[in-house]
Amino acid sequence: MSLLVNYLEKVQESEKLTGTIKEVISILLVAINDWPTPIISLGDYEKDVYKLIGEEVSRKTMKESISNIDNSKNAWEGESLSQLIEIFNYYEEEKQLKEILKDIQGKIEN
């Protein structure tokens, strides 16, 4: 996954995409912006989220991870995940984050 964040910002601002995918990209950009370290690409963000959660990332595992975050040490990660979990509202319950991000990339590139 190699979509650059600045490219996502341009796509989000353009009229290329509309509706749900534009809303999902907007949520994703807010979540990336809240991450405590600089994120250059969607792939970087995905790797960091998987590193933090430590397993397949689904709505369920993300909720568990958010509830276990020590906000005195990892408040920005918690804030980012609290934003990111919103994209699951646009997909089936059992979808994994990597499947959602792959879907987003496919819709942007087509």
Image: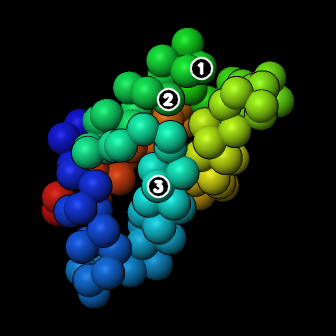
Residue 50 seen from this side: yes
Compute the Cα span from label 2 to label 3.
13 Å
Place of residue 104 in the rendered image (x, y in percent of width and height, measured from the top left): 35, 53
Query: In the rendered view, would you say 102 is above or below 53?
Result: below
In the picture, measured across the screen, residue 8 lies left or right of residue 56, that is: left
> Residue lying furthest top in this view?
54
Q: Secondary structure at mark 1?
A: helix
Q: Which residue is mark 2?
A: 49
Residue visible at 46% across and 78% down in the picture: 19
Amino acid type at mark 2: Val
Query: Closer to the camera: disc 2 or disc 3?
Result: 3
Comparing 109 with 6, the one in front is: 6
CA gap, disc 2 to disc 1?
6 Å
Above or below, comparing residue 27 to residue 98 in the picture: below
In the rendered image, the quadrant that contains the C terminus is: bottom left
* Sequence-wise first label, 2 or 3: 3
Q: Is residue 104 above or below residue 44?
A: below
Mark toward the start of the polypeptide (3 vs 1): 3
Looking at the image, residue 67 sits to the left or right of residue 26; the answer is right
Going 24% across and 62% down the picture, which residue do you hit? Answer: 6
Q: Secondary structure at mark 2?
A: helix
As shown in the figure, which amino acid type bears the numbered disc 1?
A: Ile
Q: Which mark is residue 53?
A: 1
Q: Which residue is mark 3?
A: 33
Q: Position of residue 1 (x, y in %)?
A: 23, 37
Within 10 Å of disc 1 (Cα), the crowding (few <14, some 14-19, many 20+) is some
Residue depicted at 67% across the width and 47% down the height = 79
Q: Residue furthest right?
A: 67
Q: Is 56 in front, or is 67?
A: 67
Residue 84 showing in the rendered view: no
